[in-house]
Image (tube, rainbow, N blue to C red):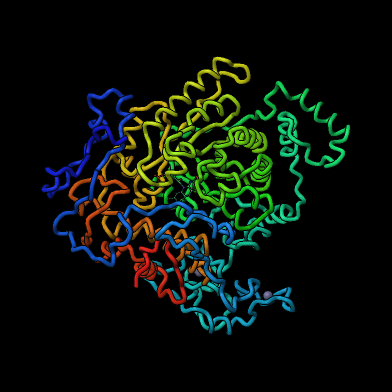
Amino acid sequence: MSENKPLGLSGTTSESKSESKIEPCLPAKRALEGEQPNEASKRALTEQPGTARVLPQFRVANDPLKDGEGAAGAVNPDNANEGGNAKAKAKAKKRRGQNKDRDNRQPKEQNALCPNLVLGQTTCPRRETCRHEHDVSKYLSLKKPEIITSYFPTCPNFSTLGYCPMGFRCRFLSTHSANTTDSSTNNPNSDLHADPQPQLLPNAAMSAENPLWLANHEINKIDPQKKRELARKQIAFVKSDFVVDIMEALRNAPIPNANPVSGPTQSQQDRRKELINKYKDTRFFAQEKKPLDLHGKKILAPLTTVGNLPYRRLMRKLGADVTYSEMALALPMIQGTSAEWALPTSHISESQGYGIQLACSKPWQAAKACEAISTCLDTTSAISEINLNSGCPIDLLHRQGAGCAMMENPAKLIRCLNAMNYTSNDIPITLKLRTGAKDNHPIADTLITRIVQETDVAAFTLHGRSRQQRYTRDADWNYISQTAAALRMAEQTRLENKDDRDSSQSRIQFVGNGDIDNYQDWHRILDSDSNIDSLMVARSALIKPWIFEEIDAQQHLDKSSSERLQILRDYADFAMQHWGTDEYGIATSRRYFCEFMSFFHRYVPVGVLERVPIRMNQRVEKWKGRDELETLMASEDSRDWIKLSEMFWGKAEGFVFVPKHKSSMRG
Ligand SMILES: Cc1cc2nc3c(=O)[nH]c(=O)nc-3n(C[C@H](O)[C@H](O)[C@H](O)COP(=O)(O)O)c2cc1C
Ligand SMILES: [Zn+2]
Ligand SMILES: [Zn+2]
């Protein structure tokens, strides 16, 4: 990558250091002048070696307290999704500087008001056994204080819905009820402003489970009844059993229910033979699929924890065309686990171009999770793809044979993809990969060639790093380009063979991923390599959520602190519409706000820098902002992130947030 001369707006070279004005931005096409497209595509991303310089008036002396671990860009998102199993955690390789055992889940409200009374009803049908508070006045006297903030003069749910489903539990109660300290009005939506009656929610069962669900334009939710049936193993996975049976027969695997001593029965053996004869020459998994078009789309990567629904809603508002759920694990989904089924839920603004991402270690898990998605959600029309994650490097998944480990067992990966393809009905199946397990042994190109021959995968996303590499060094865009070319060759061969598919089959989509953090690289890569359909952006969309706007405008945008605060306010708004405005909802919103800040604070404004762009992983001189708010927003100290949250939600009493990186903890 870096052996080539960087293009366009490169380098803090020694002669450029003395310049104190911002270099004008060249449109991507200018940067390409005189180059053969294919050469350009093989070049490194725009590069700025060394420490990025800020304008003299913004420089500050080094603060040893803040000289934590390396560059602001050194945040290493490995293990972003590691959780659970304490034993596994203990075994996991220790990485310095990380708070490995952090748990930022927020406690539930003490003395919570009975859900049957929150909207002013007077009776609880299970009063004898119900463990919630039933004395509304007492509840109100003990409740956390009202949130008074100019950023939300009215409860965000009340102002969007015309009533507040949180009722008496709302921390903005005074904005929709005249009296916040006694229950005599018996109506927490008695306000002043608008319709005091909750609108009838279309599905009573779902709204009982979560009153915000149907009111706040969220879709792709599991029917609670179906979730219970999953937990009780009452769902028949007809398609999964069928397809897995055939696969096992064809690969001559041991018969699962065979007697360990006497072996399979005659009828089991006969069934195997029958399956082999019937299906050995067919594509039994082939299905009619919805078309999938990622070409030129602005794609936000799947992001565990930070890529939650409110953040994705924000990114849709800021121009993302395609978004993905946080990675959901197939096994807990099949078992009906609520936390896992919360992950596929999306906002209505994500209806076009939304993928659910899965991780699994066995074909039967993959098959059943897809069958559950295609049969248990309220709708499947708003799911454009189910994406299998075979790029996740974390040890916890790797030990189970999931994530990156899938790439090391191509036959199993192919069985998973085919099983998913069959059980997902018309939803296309896509795959996300890394280059391979080892640094010097990339395998994605040969693997993709084989997958094209043996499956009906609709799209590939390649993150140009190996598992071993994690996030160190740059993504390898030469290799990404090479793999995209290998895909096109394989696709061509398949079309020529035409044995099992018609020639109208749409082009398999290829998405490159890794280190994209400015519009020039985006356009340069897409303009120069026609094998690549689009690019996926992860970390830089957290640091600079308006990156897609920059891509459209073909400019580096200098967002002021107040514009950035507006983005944070939108996030806070969407967070409360999702998690609620009661005590738990506010604490949860605040927690995810801080998770977002752990990336967002790394932005260095264009107007502060000597030259743009700087790279995401580049060290930056110590700097102060153009105003106090800008300086505060750039703080690496997690206590300052909490301080920012107080602008929206008031004092954070009793709130604990452990940042992922120890360098973000001060004091
Ligand atoms: C906080 C965080 C969480 C992530 N979670 C996932 C995930 O759930 N699934 C996945 O396929 N990749 C995940 N990734 C990897 C990204 O999708 C992406 O492949 C990677 O960060 C490289 O892109 P970038 O250089 O633009 O950041 C995560 C990355 C980060 C930073
Ligand atoms: Zn009750
Ligand atoms: Zn409210």
Left or right, 399 with reference to 11: right
The reply to whether residue 309 is visible in this rendering is no
Q: Residue drawn 59% across and 19% down?
A: 502
Front one among 46 and 231: 46
Quarter assignment of residue 225: bottom right
Quarter that holds the N terminus = top left
- Residue 146: horizontal and vertical position, in percent? 46, 77
Return the residue nearer the eye: 312 or 456. Answer: 456
Q: Position of residue 278 (x, y in %)?
A: 77, 24
197 in relation to 244, above or below:
below
Which of the pair 160/191 is nearer the observer?
A: 160
At a point 52% along the width and 72% down the height, the residue shown is: 583
Image label count = 0
Which quarter of the rendered image does ligand 2 occupy? Answer: bottom right
Picture coordinates of residue 563, whole percent (x, y): 30, 57
Q: Is residue 140 left or right of residue 556?
A: right
Which image quadrant: the C terminus?
bottom left
Q: Decide which of 660, 185 is in the foreground and name it.
A: 660
Q: Position of residue 519 (x, y in %)?
A: 31, 40
In the figure, residue 14 lies in which quadrant?
top left
Residue at image point 68% right, 49% down: 334
- Is 666 displayed left or right of 176 in the figure? left
Rendered image quadrant of residue 553: top left
Q: Residue furthest top?
A: 496
- Answer yes or no: is residue 339 visible: yes
